[in-house]
Image: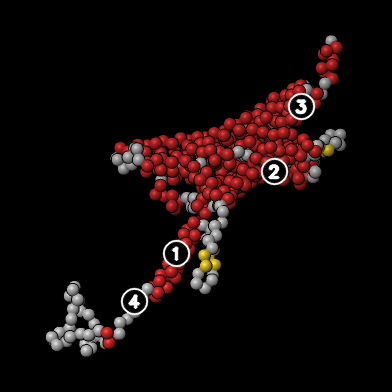
């Protein structure tokens, strides 16, 4: 009996599940923010290189990296501040409550639908390669991104007028709560299903079907090429072709699988939350806090590790990243050569310019070295007085090869 009474006195904060949830927020949140910020900034750096900008897919992935940074700094940073400083930025003002909630849902949805857009463009490039030049351009990518962004902003706009400082029955003010009873029912019982469809079910269905069709088409194309002997099976050309056709597909498959693994738990949880959290005990609330922390950290992990996925699965991405670091670490060569005027020639910064300047310097050095030698080794001209030619025969003398020899005057014989 005493044990039962003592257990009823315990609050949610006293249970180990709640303490574990606090540790997860305090430790994992800043780590993911640091990893995600550095990784997404590096992704933007690589994807905006000259060689990468030629592909319209790079535009989608660049915007995806920017959106992922916004996700981390609107959603995860709030939780970090909340558990480290005991401050909730949504409770600072009504505006911060509305804007932060709106941006968190928008950026999370935008991140998902950008993957859908990339997969759609990949489908066009594989199934309709003759239309890629016209359908998959930088302009079309910008238009698609704009349309998707406007739609998702509109879908999540109900947070701008539905939540705020709600006044309860006894005059108490609840920060960042539903303002009306009908809206509260919508947020708890209808919106989770809408969000599940927009955030998980519909995008993932499209991604699965799209990637399956890409894999089928790529495999069938390779078989047809081998059967026609257009691309021999064991040649270097075949290896290059295989890498080019599979690198992007593999990268998209990795992104999609990580997306499903990381985001489906929180989508399922939000659907069942109104039913699971009804009339919870203190111990049940502690367990709920732990589950909530786990599914959130999984969701934000999806927005933090895309750079690692690019490096693991994207061959072209890895090569471009290596080139960036090679340029940073390259030693600037200097060639100290003095020409005839005493001018100092400095080597170029890259290999091509350096080779060109080196060839020019070699030519200049050769010219300046050979000309004086020719002058120093010049055979003195024999004066006409020392040369006696007999012209009585009436014909000009010829050499052993039959070519005509001319004297100093060019057309007469000198006695």
Quarter location, residue 414 = bottom left
Rounded to the nearest angstrom, the CA distance separating label 2 from label 4 is: 85 Å
Q: Position of residue 57 (x, y in %)?
A: 51, 47
The mark found on residue 19 in the picture is 3
Rounded to the nearest angstrom, the CA distance separating label 2 from label 1 is: 57 Å
- Pick whichever of labels 3 and 1 is earlier in the sequence: 3
Image quarter hosting the N terminus: top right
- Pick whichever of labels 3 and 4 is earlier in the sequence: 3
Q: Check if mark 2's residue and mark 3's residue have beta carbons within 8 Å.
A: no
Q: Residue at x 78, y 37 (%)?
A: 84
Comparing labels 3 and 4, the label whose residue is closer to the camera? 4
Check disc 3 and report its element: helix, strand or loop: helix
Which of 167 and 332 lies nearest the eye of the viewer?
332
Q: Residue at x 54, y 40 (%)?
A: 311
Mark 3 is surrounded, within 10 Å at the Cα level, by few (under 14), some (14 to 19) or many (20 or more) other residues, namely: some
Residue that extends furthest to the front in the rendered view of this protein: 386
Mark 4 is surrounded, within 10 Å at the Cα level, by few (under 14), some (14 to 19) or many (20 or more) other residues, namely: few
Q: Check if mark 4's residue and mark 1's residue have beta carbons within 8 Å.
A: no
The mark found on residue 362 in the picture is 1
Comparing labels 2 and 4, the label whose residue is closer to the camera? 4
Image vertical order of residue 355 relative to residue 262, above or below: below
Check disc 4 and report its element: helix, strand or loop: loop
Image vertical order of residue 293 relative to residue 361, above or below: above
The mark found on residue 73 in the picture is 2
């Amino acid at each position: 009996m005493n044990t039962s009474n003592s257990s009823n006195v315990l609050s949610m904060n006293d249970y180990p599940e709640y303490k574990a949830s606090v540790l997860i927020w305090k430790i994992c949140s800043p780590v993911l923010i640091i990893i995600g910020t550095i990784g997404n900034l590096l992704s933007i750096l690589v994807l905006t290189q000259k060689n990468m900008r030629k592909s319209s897919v790079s535009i989608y992935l660049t915007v995806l990296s920017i959106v992922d940074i916004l996700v981390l700094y609107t959603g995860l940073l709030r939780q970090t501040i909340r558990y480290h400083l005991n401050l909730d930025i949504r409770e600072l003002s009504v505006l911060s409550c509305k804007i932060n909630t709106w941006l968190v849902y928008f950026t999370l949805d935008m991140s998902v639908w950008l993957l859908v857009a990339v997969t759609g463009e990949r489908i066009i490039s594989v199934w309709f390669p003759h239309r890629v030049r016209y359908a998959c351009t930088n302009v079309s990518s910008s238009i698609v991104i704009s349309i998707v962004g406007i739609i998702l902003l509109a879908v999540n706009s109900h947070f701008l007028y539905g939540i705020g400082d709600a006044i309860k029955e006894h005059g108490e003010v609840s920060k960042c709560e539903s303002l009306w009873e009908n809206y509260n029912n919508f947020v708890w019982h209808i919106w989770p299903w809408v969000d599940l469809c927009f955030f998980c079910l519909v995008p993932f269905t499209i991604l699965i079907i799209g990637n399956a069709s890409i894999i089928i088409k790529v495999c069938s194309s390779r078989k047809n090429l081998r059967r026609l002997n257009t691309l021999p099976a064991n040649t270097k050309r075949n290896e290059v072709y295989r890498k080019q056709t599979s690198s992007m597909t593999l990268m998209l498959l990795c992104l999609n699988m990580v997306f499903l693994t990381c985001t489906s738990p929180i989508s399922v949880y939000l659907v069942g939350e109104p039913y699971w959290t009804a009339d919870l005990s203190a111990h049940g609330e502690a367990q709920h806090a732990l589950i909530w922390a786990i599914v959130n950290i999984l969701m934000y992990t999806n927005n933090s590790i895309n750079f690692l996925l690019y490096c693991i699965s994207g061959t072209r991405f890895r090569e471009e990243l290596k080139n960036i670091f090679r340029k940073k670490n390259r030693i600037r060569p200097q060639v100290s050569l003095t020409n005839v005027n005493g001018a100092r020639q400095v080597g170029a910064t890259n290999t091509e310019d350096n080779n060109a300047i080196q060839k020019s310097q070699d030519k200049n050095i050769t010219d300046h070295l050979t000309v004086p030698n020719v002058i120093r080794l010049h055979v003195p001209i024999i004066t006409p007085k020392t040369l006696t030619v007999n012209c009585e025969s009436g014909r000009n003398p010829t050499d052993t090869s039959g070519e005509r020899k001319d004297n100093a005057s060019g057309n007469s014989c000198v006695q």
